[in-house]
């Protein structure tokens, strides 16, 4: 049995969300908790980190179910746009730091955007402006 493209990309996105949540907790969040930063900003950063984890998981779920979406191309554009926005944010921050590969998350997020577009079902799509 061959897995659908949306399933494959959804699983890659889900693994990314899992790595973000667990890996980030074990590295960045625990390191932050070792600092003298006050409790309130630590809590805000922790919540923000895991809000992004949840959002990455939700994007993966949306990719996985693209075949069931009534307008998969429109939905894919929204998903791809979000992945690209995150990618550009990371790329910009890397460039500001003067080190392209300091935090290469931008590359994975850009790849998820491309894979999502590749996986998007296109059968029976109406062409914009053409009436059937």
Image: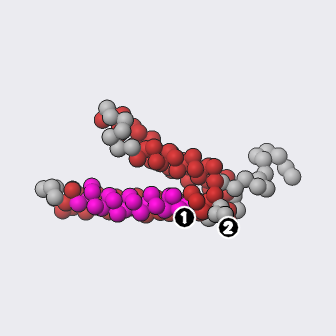
Q: Residues within 10 Å of mark 1 (few under 14, many from 20)?
A: some
- Along the horizontal axis of the image, is 66 left or right of 59? right
Q: Secondary structure at mark 1?
A: helix
- Is 131 located above or below residue 6 in the figure? above
Which residue is nearer to you in this view: 101 or 63? 101
> Which residue corresponds to the image point at 67% horizontal and 67% vertical from the top-left?
1
Q: Which residue is mark 2?
A: 1
Q: Are marks 2 and 1 in contact (CB under 8 Å)?
A: no
Picture coordinates of residue 49, whole percent (x, y): 34, 58
> What segment carries the magenta color?
10-30
> Which residue corresponds to the image point at 78% horizontal and 47% vertical from the top-left?
127
- Is 79 located above or below residue 40 in the figure? above
Picture coordinates of residue 98, whole percent (x, y): 31, 32
- Along the horizontal axis of the image, is 26 left or right of 95? left
Foreground mark, 2 or 1? Answer: 2
Label number found at residue 82: none
Of helix, strand and loop, which mostly describes the magenta segment? helix
Picture coordinates of residue 47, whole percent (x, y): 32, 62
Question: What colour scheme was applied to this rendering of the protein?
Answer: secondary structure
Q: Residues within 10 Å of mark 2 (few under 14, many from 20)?
A: few
Which residue is nearer to you in this view: 83 or 2? 2
> Which residue corresponds to the image point at 55% horizontal and 61% vertical from the top-left?
10
- Along the horizontal axis of the image, is 36 left or right of 65? left
Q: Which residue is mark 1?
A: 61
Which of pointers 2 and 1 lies earlier in the amino acid sequence? Answer: 2
Kindly give the residue lying farthest to the right in the view shown. Answer: 132
Whether residue 129 can be seen here = yes
Whether residue 78 can be seen here = no
Residue 33, by quadrant, is: bottom left
Q: Is residue 25 magenta?
A: yes
- Along the horizontal axis of the image, is 130 left or right of 29? right
- Is 128 located above or below residue 40 in the figure? above
């Amino acid at each position: 049995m061959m897995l659908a493209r949306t399933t494959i990309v959804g699983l890659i996105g889900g693994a990314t969300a899992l790595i973000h949540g667990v890996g980030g907790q074990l590295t960045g969040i625990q390191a932050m908790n070792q600092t003298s930063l006050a409790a309130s900003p630590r809590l805000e950063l922790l919540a923000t980190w895991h809000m992004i984890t949840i959002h990455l998981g939700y994007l993966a779920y949306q990719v996985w179910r693209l075949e069931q979406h009534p307008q998969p191309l429109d939905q894919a554009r929204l998903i791809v746009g979000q992945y690209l926005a995150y990618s550009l944010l990371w790329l910009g921050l890397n460039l500001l730091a003067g080190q392209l590969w300091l935090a290469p998350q931008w590359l994975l997020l850009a790849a998820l955007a491309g894979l999502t577009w590749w996986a998007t079902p296109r059968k029976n799509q109406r062409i914009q402006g053409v009436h059937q």
